[in-house]
Amino acid sequence: MGSASTIAAKTANSARENLSPKRNDLQWIEGMLNVAKRIWPTKTAFHLANEAGVSERAAQFWLAGQTGMTLAAARELMRGPHGFEFLVAYVGEDCEALWFQRCKLAHEVGVQSRKIRSEEKRFATLKAKQQQLALDLDREI
């Protein structure tokens, strides 16, 4: 490689690093693999392959750090049932873009709404049991 090419290559790499000082180009892959390991602590490669639409061998290579995940596979992960977690890993928790902040807020509202509905059902079940016990006590007297 000529000296001009060497200088151009170094400049191109440093310019890319300067665009995103908080995240390098490959950090998103590590983040997404960490999410996969957390979601599927056993048979990680198997589940990762199924969700990403790739072979289990490809997923094993990703997990071993031998090859990088493709953007097509990352897209499939983000379109799946754990998509939001993979999206956060891809863009980074520190993303300050307004669209991402809105997305995070909407996700949290959804999570909290599901928790509230679940607790309301649980509360209704407990109230019904309490009423049934009160009726049973009245019959005994």
Image: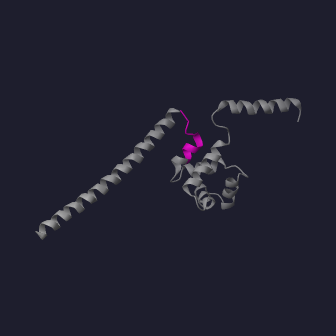
In the picture, measured across the screen, residue 66 lies left or right of residue 39, that is: right
- Check if residue 83 falls in the magenta segment: no
The location of residue 66, given as percent across then percent down, is 73, 52
Nearest the eye: 140 or 51:
140
Q: Is residue 1 above or below residue 128?
A: above
Horizontally, residue 9 falls left or right of residue 18, namely right
The x, y position of residue 30, in whole percent, is 64, 47
Task: Identify the residue at the far bottom of this view.
Answer: 140
Q: Position of residue 59 (x, y in %)?
A: 66, 57
Q: Outermost residue toward the right?
A: 2
Residue plotted at (27% across, 59% down): 126
Q: What residue appears at the point 74 percent right and 31 percent down from the top-left corner?
A: 14
Q: What is the span of residues highlighted in magenta in the rendered image?
A: 86-96
Q: Is residue 24 above or below residue 46?
A: above
The quadrant where residue 7 appears: top right
Q: Quadrant of the C terminus?
A: bottom left
Q: With 104 as the anchor, is 130 left or right in this view?
A: left
